[in-house]
Image (tube, rainbow, N blue to C red):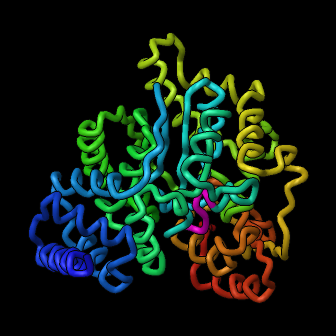
């Protein structure tokens, strides 16, 4: 038995070496490697070599399929019947927490949506980080199944469930490096969708000069790979490539992004309209796909708007929070952002011409996000708005006053806004 275990590890090492020199891997090689990583037999150093090889070389079409299949097969799966919807964003953009809006709308429409979410890798908050400020997100597979069967949807962390476990370990290696390869992102996303029985998927690919995907050419290449892979796994995929100049919401950081979600679901006058519009567009496209399969004659975006404005989405969100052991009486008024805060004011009058997403991420992390749930930035002004000297541009939040001061000092050298006089 020990000899066999050693042989598997040696074979996995040979697979990594083979990938490092640019050779194509077989399914058997890939499965053995994923199995070794999933069972914590490779160690961080060897896993890092694999991450580096995949970042440099990328995967062939067959490797993408084989890696996805192997990630699914080496972990647990959740079986749901019928139409199962899901949503994912390529990520990399701060303050755009659409999933927490989309899930309750889809569930309120009568479709199952088991949303397994990650924690932050390159941004100040992942969906799981934000949802955790309102409810528990760490559950076992059986409990997740029960929650979805009971209330129609969930928003949970995927890192403690044993679903695509190799991916969770690889993410831990990627996190301090703050990078993911596009092909690795594709495998990671698709493996988790397949593992929860998803058969209708909306994929959000934001594009921008300071986003993870910087041009439409790359976005279209990524989209094409997703479409080919989804077809092989019988998933109906809809892809939304959209150019973004700034975060759609105003809050950046776990609690601040959750606050934006509450504002929208409550239809508060304080809600960030750009985030609402984006969430409704994505939800509408996903509902169109589900309605078509179910032979229901409804317009997806109109139905999404109705479910939001009628309060049915908010009611469903409260049901999800309760099912995930949170306080279902929470409101935007009762949800307190704890700690210290400070406003940044304009040093001259002008018009905001650019918003730098990379710098938003950097400053928010300096403030302590995502580890500090209440840390982050609240954007008071948006691109295209005129501002006056001395007017507040944004507000920093942190439970650590020293980090608050550090962010104030740092933004002088890495500004978030470009203001033209």
The picture places residue 12, in percent across and down from the top left corner, at: 21, 75
Q: Is residue 199 visible?
A: yes
Q: Quadrant of residue 201?
A: top left
Task: Identify which residue, 258 or 71, lies in the foreground.
Answer: 71
The residue shown at (43%, 38%) is: 197
Q: Name the residue furthest right.
A: 334
174 sits left or right of 357 in the view: left
Residue at the image point whose x is 30% and y is 83% from the top: 46
Magenta stretch: includes residue 123: yes
Residue 387: x, y in percent? 73, 61
Q: Quadrant of the N terminus?
A: bottom left
- The residues colored magenta run 122-128
Is residue 349 shown left or right of residue 365?
right
The one nearer the camera, 13 or 62, is: 13
Number of numbered callouts drawn: 0
Q: Name the residue located 43 percent from the left edge and 52 percent from the top edge.
A: 76
């Amino acid at each position: 038995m020990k000899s066999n275990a050693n042989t598997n590890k040696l074979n996995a090492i040979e697979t990594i070496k083979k990938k490092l020199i640019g050779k194509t891997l077989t399914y058997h090689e890939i499965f053995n490697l994923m199995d070794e990583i999933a069972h914590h037999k490779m160690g961080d150093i060897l896993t890092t070599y694999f991450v580096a090889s995949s970042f440099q070389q990328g995967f062939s079409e067959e490797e993408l399929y084989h890696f996805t299949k192997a990630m699914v097969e080496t972990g647990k799966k959740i079986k749901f019947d019928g139409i199962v919807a899901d949503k994912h964003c390529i990520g990399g953009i701060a303050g755009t927490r659409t999933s927490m809006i989309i899930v309750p709308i889809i569930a309120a429409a009568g479709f199952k949506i088991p949303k397994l979410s990650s924690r932050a890798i390159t941004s100040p908050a992942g969906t799981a980080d934000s949802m955790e400020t309102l409810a528990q997100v760490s559950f076992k597979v059986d409990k997740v199944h029960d929650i979805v069967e009971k209330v129609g949807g969930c928003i949970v962390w995927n890192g403690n469930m044993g679903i695509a476990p190799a991916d969770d370990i690889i993410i831990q290696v990627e996190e301090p490096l703050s990078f993911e390869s596009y092909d690795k992102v594709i495998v990671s996303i698709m493996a988790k969708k397949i593992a929860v029985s998803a058969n209708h998927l909306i994929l959000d690919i934001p594009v921008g000069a300071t986003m993870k995907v910087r041009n439409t050419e790359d976005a279209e290449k990524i989209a094409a790979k997703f479409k080919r892979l989804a077809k092989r796994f019988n998933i109906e995929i809809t892809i939304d490539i959209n150019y973004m100049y700034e975060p759609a919401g105003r809050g950046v950081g776990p609690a601040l992004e959750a606050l934006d979600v509450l504002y929208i679901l409550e239809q508060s006058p304080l809600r960030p309209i750009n985030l609402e519009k984006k969430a409704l567009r994505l939800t509408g496209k996903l509902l169109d796909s589900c309605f078509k399969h179910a032979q229901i004659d409804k317009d997806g975006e109109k139905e999404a708007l109705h479910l939001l404005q009628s309060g049915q989405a908010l009611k469903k969100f409260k049901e999800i929070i309760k099912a995930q052991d949170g306080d279902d009486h929470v409101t935007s008024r009762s949800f307190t952002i704890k700690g210290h805060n400070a406003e940044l004011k304009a040093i001259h009058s002008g018009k905001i011409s650019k918003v730098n997403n990379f710098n938003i991420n950097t400053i928010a992390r300096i403030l302590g996000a995502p580890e500090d749930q209440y840390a982050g930035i609240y954007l008071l002004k948006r691109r295209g708005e005129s501002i006056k000297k001395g007017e507040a541009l944004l507000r920093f939040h942190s439970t650590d006053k020293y980090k608050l001061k550090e962010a104030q000092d740092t933004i002088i050298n890495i500004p978030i806004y470009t203001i033209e006089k």
